[in-house]
Amino acid sequence: MFPALKKVLSTFLICATCCSAGQIPGDDFLADQVASFTSVRYAVLRSPRSLKSDPIENELDRLGNRGQLIARARSSVLAILATENSCTAWYRQSEPVPSEIFRSLHFVVDISGNEEIFKREGTSGELEYLQPYVAHSRQEVGSGSEIMLNANGAFFKQYARVRYSITPPNSYTNQLVRFLVVGDFPGDTAQARILTLLHEFAHVVGLIPADSGTQSAAFLSVQNTKTVLKNCKLQIELEAKQTREVPQRFLSAATAHHQQSHFFAPMRGSSAIPPRQ
Ligand SMILES: [Zn+2]
Protein backbone atom coordinates (compact mmCIF):
# COMPACT_ATOMS: atom_id res chain seq x y z
CA MET A 1 0.00 0.00 0.00
CA PHE A 2 2.85 2.33 0.76
CA PRO A 3 5.82 0.82 -1.06
CA ALA A 4 8.01 3.82 -0.35
CA LEU A 5 7.54 3.67 3.41
CA LYS A 6 10.79 2.34 4.71
CA LYS A 7 11.94 4.10 7.80
CA VAL A 8 10.59 4.43 11.27
CA LEU A 9 12.48 6.86 13.40
CA SER A 10 11.83 8.69 16.59
CA THR A 11 11.16 12.25 17.61
CA PHE A 12 13.36 14.66 19.51
CA LEU A 13 10.79 16.38 21.64
CA ILE A 14 11.65 17.89 24.97
CA CYS A 15 9.54 16.38 27.74
CA ALA A 16 7.57 18.12 30.42
CA THR A 17 7.74 16.29 33.70
CA CYS A 18 4.35 15.42 35.09
CA CYS A 19 2.94 12.58 37.12
CA SER A 20 -0.55 11.14 37.16
CA ALA A 21 -2.44 10.18 40.25
CA GLY A 22 -3.72 6.70 40.94
CA GLN A 23 -4.54 4.02 43.46
CA ILE A 24 -2.45 1.53 45.33
CA PRO A 25 -3.08 -2.05 44.21
CA GLY A 26 -4.43 -4.27 46.96
CA ASP A 27 -3.31 -7.67 48.16
CA ASP A 28 -5.92 -9.33 45.94
CA PHE A 29 -4.27 -7.83 42.88
CA LEU A 30 -0.90 -9.07 44.02
CA ALA A 31 -2.20 -12.54 44.82
CA ASP A 32 -3.80 -12.77 41.38
CA GLN A 33 -0.49 -12.02 39.78
CA VAL A 34 1.63 -14.35 41.85
CA ALA A 35 1.01 -17.46 39.77
CA SER A 36 2.74 -15.93 36.77
CA PHE A 37 5.72 -14.48 38.60
CA THR A 38 9.23 -15.80 38.74
CA SER A 39 10.69 -16.38 42.17
CA VAL A 40 12.36 -12.99 42.18
CA ARG A 41 9.23 -11.13 41.25
CA TYR A 42 7.27 -13.21 43.71
CA ALA A 43 9.60 -12.08 46.46
CA VAL A 44 9.22 -8.46 45.44
CA LEU A 45 5.46 -8.35 45.06
CA ARG A 46 4.17 -11.00 47.41
CA SER A 47 5.41 -9.61 50.67
CA PRO A 48 3.74 -6.45 52.03
CA ARG A 49 6.89 -5.85 54.04
CA SER A 50 8.95 -5.87 50.85
CA LEU A 51 6.54 -3.42 49.25
CA LYS A 52 6.89 -1.00 52.13
CA SER A 53 10.65 -1.30 52.12
CA ASP A 54 10.93 -0.51 48.41
CA PRO A 55 10.47 3.25 47.96
CA ILE A 56 10.33 2.93 44.18
CA GLU A 57 7.40 0.51 44.42
CA ASN A 58 5.64 3.03 46.63
CA GLU A 59 6.27 5.77 44.07
CA LEU A 60 4.85 3.60 41.30
CA ASP A 61 1.76 2.83 43.38
CA ARG A 62 0.92 6.52 43.16
CA LEU A 63 1.04 6.46 39.33
CA GLY A 64 -2.11 4.36 39.00
CA ASN A 65 -2.47 1.94 36.10
CA ARG A 66 0.59 3.28 34.36
CA GLY A 67 2.55 2.75 37.55
CA GLN A 68 1.42 -0.88 37.62
CA LEU A 69 2.70 -1.40 34.08
CA ILE A 70 6.02 0.22 34.98
CA ALA A 71 6.25 -1.89 38.15
CA ARG A 72 5.66 -5.07 36.18
CA ALA A 73 8.34 -4.21 33.62
CA ARG A 74 10.68 -3.13 36.42
CA SER A 75 10.15 -6.49 38.16
CA SER A 76 10.96 -8.26 34.90
CA VAL A 77 14.21 -6.31 34.52
CA LEU A 78 15.13 -7.04 38.14
CA ALA A 79 14.43 -10.73 37.54
CA ILE A 80 16.70 -10.69 34.49
CA LEU A 81 19.50 -8.92 36.34
CA ALA A 82 19.19 -11.26 39.35
CA THR A 83 20.30 -14.27 37.32
CA GLU A 84 23.39 -15.18 35.34
CA ASN A 85 22.73 -14.65 31.65
CA SER A 86 24.11 -12.78 28.66
CA CYS A 87 22.13 -9.65 29.49
CA THR A 88 23.37 -9.46 33.08
CA ALA A 89 26.93 -10.14 31.92
CA TRP A 90 26.67 -7.23 29.48
CA TYR A 91 25.56 -4.76 32.17
CA ARG A 92 28.23 -6.10 34.49
CA GLN A 93 30.81 -4.72 32.07
CA SER A 94 29.83 -1.34 33.49
CA GLU A 95 28.57 -2.13 37.00
CA PRO A 96 29.57 -5.10 39.20
CA VAL A 97 26.03 -5.42 40.59
CA PRO A 98 23.74 -3.87 37.96
CA SER A 99 20.54 -4.90 39.73
CA GLU A 100 21.37 -2.59 42.64
CA ILE A 101 21.69 0.40 40.35
CA PHE A 102 18.52 -0.41 38.44
CA ARG A 103 16.54 -0.96 41.64
CA SER A 104 17.39 2.60 42.73
CA LEU A 105 16.06 4.30 39.59
CA HIS A 106 12.98 6.53 39.76
CA PHE A 107 10.24 6.73 37.13
CA VAL A 108 8.26 9.69 35.87
CA VAL A 109 5.35 9.63 33.40
CA ASP A 110 5.18 12.50 30.91
CA ILE A 111 1.44 12.78 30.34
CA SER A 112 1.88 15.68 27.90
CA GLY A 113 4.44 13.93 25.70
CA ASN A 114 4.07 13.97 21.94
CA GLU A 115 1.34 11.62 20.73
CA GLU A 116 1.74 11.74 16.96
CA ILE A 117 3.81 9.91 14.39
CA PHE A 118 5.44 12.53 12.19
CA LYS A 119 5.60 11.64 8.50
CA ARG A 120 8.11 13.41 6.32
CA GLU A 121 10.21 13.07 3.22
CA GLY A 122 13.82 12.07 3.80
CA THR A 123 16.85 13.58 2.11
CA SER A 124 16.86 10.86 -0.56
CA GLY A 125 13.13 11.17 -1.21
CA GLU A 126 11.86 8.22 0.77
CA LEU A 127 9.17 8.66 3.38
CA GLU A 128 10.13 8.53 7.04
CA TYR A 129 7.93 8.04 10.09
CA LEU A 130 9.14 9.52 13.35
CA GLN A 131 7.49 7.94 16.34
CA PRO A 132 6.68 9.85 19.50
CA TYR A 133 9.51 9.35 21.93
CA VAL A 134 9.25 6.40 24.29
CA ALA A 135 11.55 7.28 27.17
CA HIS A 136 14.25 9.61 28.44
CA SER A 137 17.20 9.14 30.76
CA ARG A 138 20.53 10.85 31.24
CA GLN A 139 23.89 9.47 30.26
CA GLU A 140 26.02 7.79 32.94
CA VAL A 141 24.15 9.28 35.87
CA GLY A 142 24.06 6.05 37.83
CA SER A 143 22.26 5.23 41.05
CA GLY A 144 19.12 7.15 42.04
CA SER A 145 18.60 8.79 38.67
CA GLU A 146 15.37 9.01 36.70
CA ILE A 147 13.73 7.41 33.68
CA MET A 148 10.94 9.42 32.08
CA LEU A 149 8.29 7.59 30.07
CA ASN A 150 6.01 9.19 27.48
CA ALA A 151 2.40 8.39 28.36
CA ASN A 152 1.63 8.63 24.63
CA GLY A 153 4.56 6.57 23.37
CA ALA A 154 5.05 2.88 22.67
CA PHE A 155 5.62 1.99 26.32
CA PHE A 156 1.89 2.53 26.93
CA LYS A 157 0.26 2.83 23.49
CA GLN A 158 -0.26 0.44 20.57
CA TYR A 159 -0.70 2.98 17.78
CA ALA A 160 -0.69 6.69 17.05
CA ARG A 161 -2.13 9.12 14.58
CA VAL A 162 0.13 10.18 11.71
CA ARG A 163 0.71 13.78 10.75
CA TYR A 164 2.25 14.73 7.45
CA SER A 165 4.84 17.47 7.59
CA ILE A 166 3.48 19.50 4.70
CA THR A 167 -0.01 19.84 6.17
CA PRO A 168 -0.85 22.90 8.26
CA PRO A 169 -0.79 22.57 12.03
CA ASN A 170 -3.74 20.62 13.41
CA SER A 171 -4.54 19.29 9.95
CA TYR A 172 -4.44 15.54 9.45
CA THR A 173 -4.42 13.44 6.33
CA ASN A 174 -7.22 10.90 6.33
CA GLN A 175 -6.81 10.29 10.04
CA LEU A 176 -4.10 7.79 9.22
CA VAL A 177 -2.85 5.74 12.16
CA ARG A 178 0.05 3.34 12.46
CA PHE A 179 1.31 0.93 15.02
CA LEU A 180 3.98 2.00 17.46
CA VAL A 181 6.89 -0.36 18.06
CA VAL A 182 10.00 -0.66 20.20
CA GLY A 183 12.67 -2.58 18.34
CA ASP A 184 11.07 -5.80 17.18
CA PHE A 185 8.13 -5.54 19.54
CA PRO A 186 4.66 -3.97 19.21
CA GLY A 187 3.88 -1.07 21.52
CA ASP A 188 2.02 -1.62 24.77
CA THR A 189 3.42 -5.11 25.31
CA ALA A 190 5.57 -6.56 28.06
CA GLN A 191 8.41 -7.01 25.58
CA ALA A 192 8.32 -3.36 24.52
CA ARG A 193 8.28 -2.18 28.12
CA ILE A 194 11.14 -4.42 29.26
CA LEU A 195 13.23 -3.43 26.25
CA THR A 196 12.55 0.24 26.90
CA LEU A 197 13.74 0.02 30.51
CA LEU A 198 16.83 -1.99 29.53
CA HIS A 199 17.67 0.56 26.82
CA GLU A 200 17.40 3.48 29.22
CA PHE A 201 19.31 1.59 31.91
CA ALA A 202 22.13 1.04 29.41
CA HIS A 203 22.34 4.85 29.07
CA VAL A 204 22.31 5.29 32.83
CA VAL A 205 25.35 3.04 33.24
CA GLY A 206 27.07 4.26 30.07
CA LEU A 207 26.92 1.05 28.05
CA ILE A 208 25.50 2.73 24.93
CA PRO A 209 26.27 6.22 23.62
CA ALA A 210 23.98 9.22 24.01
CA ASP A 211 21.42 9.37 21.20
CA SER A 212 19.77 12.75 21.51
CA GLY A 213 19.67 16.18 19.96
CA THR A 214 20.20 15.65 16.24
CA GLN A 215 18.52 13.90 13.35
CA SER A 216 21.36 11.43 13.04
CA ALA A 217 20.87 10.61 16.72
CA ALA A 218 17.61 8.91 15.77
CA PHE A 219 19.56 6.40 13.74
CA LEU A 220 21.97 5.94 16.65
CA SER A 221 19.00 5.26 18.89
CA VAL A 222 17.90 2.49 16.53
CA GLN A 223 21.39 1.06 16.68
CA ASN A 224 21.42 1.29 20.47
CA THR A 225 18.17 -0.65 20.63
CA LYS A 226 19.72 -3.33 18.42
CA THR A 227 22.68 -3.53 20.78
CA VAL A 228 20.37 -4.08 23.75
CA LEU A 229 18.46 -6.75 21.83
CA LYS A 230 21.66 -8.50 20.83
CA ASN A 231 22.51 -9.00 24.49
CA CYS A 232 19.07 -9.28 26.08
CA LYS A 233 16.44 -10.40 23.57
CA LEU A 234 16.22 -13.97 24.87
CA GLN A 235 15.76 -12.79 28.45
CA ILE A 236 13.17 -10.21 27.39
CA GLU A 237 11.07 -12.84 25.64
CA LEU A 238 11.37 -15.30 28.52
CA GLU A 239 10.33 -12.68 31.04
CA ALA A 240 7.42 -11.49 28.90
CA LYS A 241 6.24 -15.07 28.70
CA GLN A 242 6.41 -15.32 32.47
CA THR A 243 4.15 -12.33 32.88
CA ARG A 244 1.63 -13.96 30.53
CA GLU A 245 1.12 -10.59 28.94
CA VAL A 246 0.31 -12.03 25.53
CA PRO A 247 0.04 -9.29 22.90
CA GLN A 248 -3.43 -10.48 22.01
CA ARG A 249 -4.73 -6.98 22.58
CA PHE A 250 -2.33 -5.76 19.93
CA LEU A 251 -3.53 -8.33 17.43
CA SER A 252 -7.16 -7.57 18.18
CA ALA A 253 -6.55 -3.86 17.75
CA ALA A 254 -4.77 -4.52 14.47
CA THR A 255 -7.79 -6.31 13.09
CA ALA A 256 -10.20 -3.66 14.32
CA HIS A 257 -8.28 -0.72 12.91
CA HIS A 258 -7.56 -2.40 9.64
CA GLN A 259 -11.27 -2.69 9.17
CA GLN A 260 -11.80 0.96 10.01
CA SER A 261 -9.38 2.47 7.56
CA HIS A 262 -7.64 1.25 4.47
CA PHE A 263 -4.91 3.73 5.22
CA PHE A 264 -3.90 1.73 8.22
CA ALA A 265 -0.83 -0.42 7.68
CA PRO A 266 1.30 -2.35 10.18
CA MET A 267 4.60 -0.66 10.80
CA ARG A 268 7.53 -2.12 8.94
CA GLY A 269 11.25 -1.73 9.42
CA SER A 270 13.23 -0.81 12.46
CA SER A 271 12.26 1.43 15.28
CA ALA A 272 13.89 3.27 18.09
CA ILE A 273 13.69 4.35 21.59
CA PRO A 274 13.99 8.01 20.84
CA PRO A 275 16.88 10.34 21.32
CA ARG A 276 17.05 11.53 24.87
CA GLN A 277 17.29 15.16 25.91
ZN1 LIG B 1 18.72 5.74 23.69
Image (tube, rainbow, N blue to C red):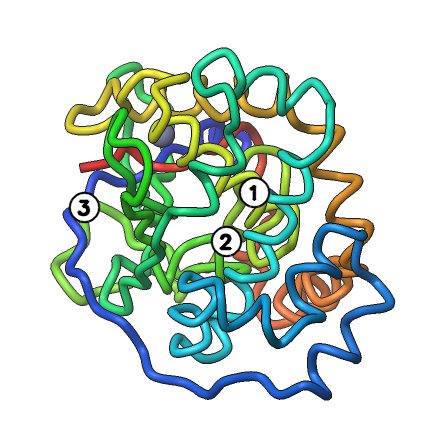
Give the secondary structure at mark 3: loop
User: Which residue is under mark 2?
Assistant: 178
Instruction: Identify residue type, mark 1.
Output: Met
User: Which residue is under mark 3?
Assistant: 13
Q: Is 119 left, or right, of 222 in this rendering? A: left
Label 3 and label 2: CA atoms lie apart by: 19 Å
Instruction: Identify residue type, mark 3.
Output: Leu
Q: Is 155 left, or right, of 50 in this rendering? A: left
Q: Residue furthest right?
A: 35
Cβ atoms at labels 2 and 1 below 8 Å apart: yes
Q: Residue furthest top?
A: 93
Q: Nearer the viewer, residue 12 or 127?
A: 12
Q: Earlier in the sequence, mark 3 or mark 1?
A: 3
**Image coords of residue 64 (percent x, y):** 45, 80
Residue at figure coordinates x 46%, y 88% from the top left: 23
Give the secondary structure at mark 1: loop
User: Which residue is under mark 1?
Assistant: 267
Q: Quadrant of residue 165?
A: top left
Residue at figure coordinates x 23%, y 67% from the top left: 112
Q: Where does the C terminus fall, quadrant-wise?
A: top left
Residue at figure coordinates x 47%, y 46% from the top left: 103
Label 2 and label 1: CA atoms lie apart by: 6 Å
